[in-house]
Every structure is written in C-alpha cells, then in structure tokens.
Amino acid sequence: MHMLIGALEKVATKYAPSRALSFDVVHIFKTLQLIENNGHVSRDLLCEELGLGEGSIKTLIKHLKMNNLIQTSNRGTKMTNGGKAIFSELISSIPAETILPRCSIALGKFNHAVLLKELSYAVRSGIEQRDAAIRMGGTGATTLLFRDNKFLMPASGSRGQDTLRKEQNIRAILIDKLKPQEDDVIIIGSADIDRKTAELAAKNAALLTLVNHEKHN
C-alpha cells in the first residue's frame, strides 16, 4: 500500500518550473474511480465532478499520463493496466461509500460516508480526518469506529455507548450501504457547498488515514 500511495503523491507533485498545482491526491483517486465506473471519461465530466477548471484538468491528465496511469484517445481518458492495478488495491481499502442525510453526527447540509477496512487502530482522535476534510472545502468530518457491532467515537474506547443509538435511521443506512465489519472505520465528510465537496472531503480524510497508517508501519 505504501508504494500505491506514493504513486498518487508522485502524480500530485509539480514539475519545475510549473505553477503550483490545484489538484491533490484525492482528485487523482476520484479520477481513477470515475474512469473505473464509466469505462472512460471526458474532460468536461472531470471538470464537473472534481470541481476544477479546464486548465487544472489538463494538467492533471498530463501528470497521470506521465506516470503511465491513463491513456487518452478521441473517446476520452481510460486507465492503463498499471492504473487499474493501483486503483484495485486502493479500492480494496476503501470499498464502499454512501450519501447521508443531515443528522446529529454529521456537520453539514451535504454528507458523504466512506468505509475504510480494518483501520480503526490507525485513527487517534479524529482531528486529523477533520482537518483533511476542511482542506477540501468541507465543514469537517466525523470519524466512527465499528467495534462489537457498535459505532464508536475514537476517544470512547471499546466500552463506549453506540454513537448512533439515537440515530437508528442513520445506523440502518450505514449498515445496509457500507456493511462494516469489526475494526472498520467510517468517515463522514460534510459540506454546506454541495455534495461533491462533501464527497471529496470524506475521501481526502480516508486517504490521509491510509497515508498515516503506512508511515507508522
């Protein structure tokens, strides 16, 4: 996994004397996800889904091509075998996601939850995840650990009360859509701007958790 995260970070590194990049690792992950889901993507779709301008998308595609993760044609952009291999490994750690309505544990008008497999031990207080979400323009992130069939806040410990005991509707959505198992992590990214910002906020927090996990291994 360390090499995979490093590959994404390399794509998000500027090449002198280029200007500072307006995209990050999360935009690269989302680009690969869009290609996987659609077969190929256009620049217009990337602009719409990533919230980036045409110039930034052009540079993003250039960097992805330089690192042999994608190839382009008249039909659009699609992944190379190398890109598919990297994405397959990443999505095994972040295998599910869902939209959530406003509730007491989510922080914004728009909320997006992602699942991280078996990484509860890699989460400390949840502050790092919150900050990663804010960097994407979100209002923050709520991090939950799934232990003993309960959704717990990071600081509560395994004996804490289920955080969603009064939010049975939200609990049912997370169980049905994400299907968490013991020691999985759920990160809910929130935003007041739009759903795409909430999604990027959640995924940036998830990727940060993977990076921090690898650094401490």
Image (cartoon, grey):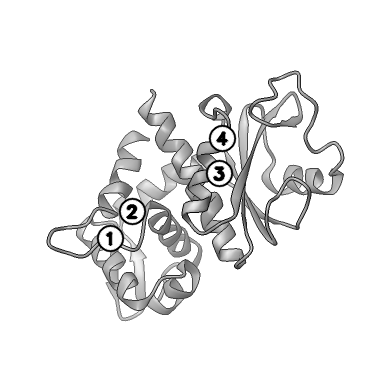
Q: Nearer the viewer, mark 1 or mark 3?
A: 3
Labels 1 and 3: the sequence-earlier one: 1
Question: 85 left or right of 100?
Answer: left
Look at discs 2 and 1 and give the one toward the viewer.
Answer: 1
Query: Label 2 to label 4, Cα distance in Å?
Result: 21 Å
| Residue 124 at x, y percent in the picture | 55, 27
Residues under numbered marks 2 and 1 in contact, where contact means CB atoms less than 8 Å apart? yes
Amino acid carrying mark 3 in the image:
Arg
Toward the left, the furthest residue is: 17
Q: Amino acid at mark 1?
A: Leu
Q: Which mark is residue 64?
A: 1
SS of the residue under disc 2: helix
For badge 2, the amino acid type reads Gly
**Mark-to-mark CA distance, 2 and 3:** 29 Å
Q: Position of residue 89 (x, y in %)?
A: 42, 42
Task: Tell me whether circle 3 and circle 4 mark residues in contact (CB < 8 Å).
Answer: no
Mark 1 Cα within 10 Å, few/some/many (few <14, many 20+)?
many
Please give the residue where the numbered disc 4 appears in the rendered image: 117
Q: CA distance from mark 2 to mark 1?
A: 9 Å
Q: Residue at x 61, y 67 (%)?
A: 194
Q: Image point 76% across, 23% down: which residue?
A: 160
Q: Position of residue 157 (x, y in %)?
A: 68, 20
Tell me which numbered mark, 2 or 3, is placed earlier along the sequence.
Answer: 2
Amino acid type assigned to the residue bearing label 4 in the image: Lys
Label 3 belongs to which residue? 130
**Pointer 2 residue:** 83
* Dot 4 crowding, Cα within 10 Å, few <14, some 14–19, many 20+: some
CA distance for labels 3 and 4: 19 Å
